[in-house]
Image (cartoon, rainbow, N blue to C red):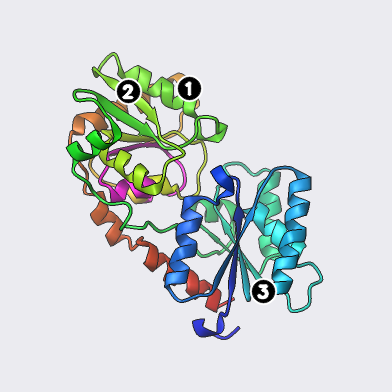
Amino acid sequence: MTNNKSQIKKVLFVASGNKKGGNVSSFVRSQYESLISAGLDMLLFPVSGHGWKAYLYAVWQLRKLVRKEHPDIIHAHYSTCGFVASLATLCMRNRPKILVSILGSFPTRNAKRRRVRWAIQHLWDGALTKSERTRNQLGLELPVIPNGVNLDIFHPIDFTTAREAVGFKEGKKYVIWCSNPSRPEKNWGLAEQAVESVKCKVEGVELVAVYDKTPDEVCMYMNAADCLLLTSDSEGSPNVIKEAIACNCPIVTTDVGDVNERLANLNGCHVVRDNELKSERVRELGEAIGKAIAFGKRTDGRKRLLDDKLEISQIANRIIDVYKHM
């Protein structure tokens, strides 16, 4: 492939399609659309379902699509989709290059880490991570490209207007948590306990789970909230943090992914380091939530995001540069 994006005729995105309605994640959709805006011919293949039967069906369907469309690059999101792409193109003549975005992290040296590390070295044509932390965990020299943020969607809105729009009551303090409570890796139980620990010190605090919403609706909640809380045990570069930054929303988060880089010295935002004692972790998160609420105003996060060059079109150009050098 020559180093000219006009020679990248077609890119096929492969990503999990298990969101509501069989959709891919909003950040995958945003990245996909940003690359279309940058002038690339794009295709999208959602991998739906769970278990080996669903994956085998996806391999078969993807193989048919690749033979029909002849993409230059398959860009898979998550390692599982990378393995699906590899199987789908096995022994294929003029096989497209495979690039895999590693979206999670590897806090322990487990079998998954070894499997992904092997695939990067021996199976795929390229890979990128979302944070320095994940790259260091893998121990490989890989590009670090966080997901970008669509600043036209995620932007500051008048606090009172936003609260009226989402139905927040006057005099209450709202902590939002942007995920589905049924996802165990997001740790809703920890969020509940942390907010409960604040209630004896701050009157009128409520925790609200925000999910199955459009990006515009999520933006409104972020502008209406007194604080956004993230309690995940592991993340790559959590988009919800960058989106909240773009809305100037105060943030409290566990120490995952690249949150330290994104929030360093940003007033109104707090990163709580892991603690082996669960009671201490709850207490420290609760104290941080109290401080974020007491901050009582919006942050300067949007300026930080612009300084870090994380607007979605800027990220699209960095991804295209990776494509050009595969």
Q: Which residues are magenta?
A: 241-261
The amino acid pointed to by label 2 is Glu
Q: Earlier in the sequence, mark 3 or mark 1?
A: 3
Q: Is residue 49 magenta?
A: no
Question: Residue 306, labelled with which disc?
Answer: none
**Residue mark closest to the camera, 2 vs 1:** 2
The amino acid pointed to by label 3 is Glu
- Nearer the observer, 310 or 61: 61
Does residue 272 sit above or below 46 in this rendering?
above
Could you tell me how far apart the alpha carbons at marks 3 and 2 are, in whole angstroms? 50 Å
- Nearer the observer, 164 or 222: 164
Q: Earlier in the sequence, mark 2 or mark 1?
A: 2
Q: In this figure, which residue is indicated by the disc labeled 2?
A: 206
Q: Quadrant of the N terminus?
A: bottom right
Residue at 50% across / 44% down in the picture? Answer: 235
- Asked which quadrant contains residue 250, the reply is top left
Residue 24's spot in the image, x, y percent? Answer: 55, 52
Q: Earlier in the sequence, mark 3 or mark 2?
A: 3
Q: Is residue 249 magenta?
A: yes
- Nearer the observer, 58 or 297: 58
Does residue 159 sit above or below 262 in this rendering?
above
Q: In this figure, which residue is indicated by the disc labeled 3?
A: 69
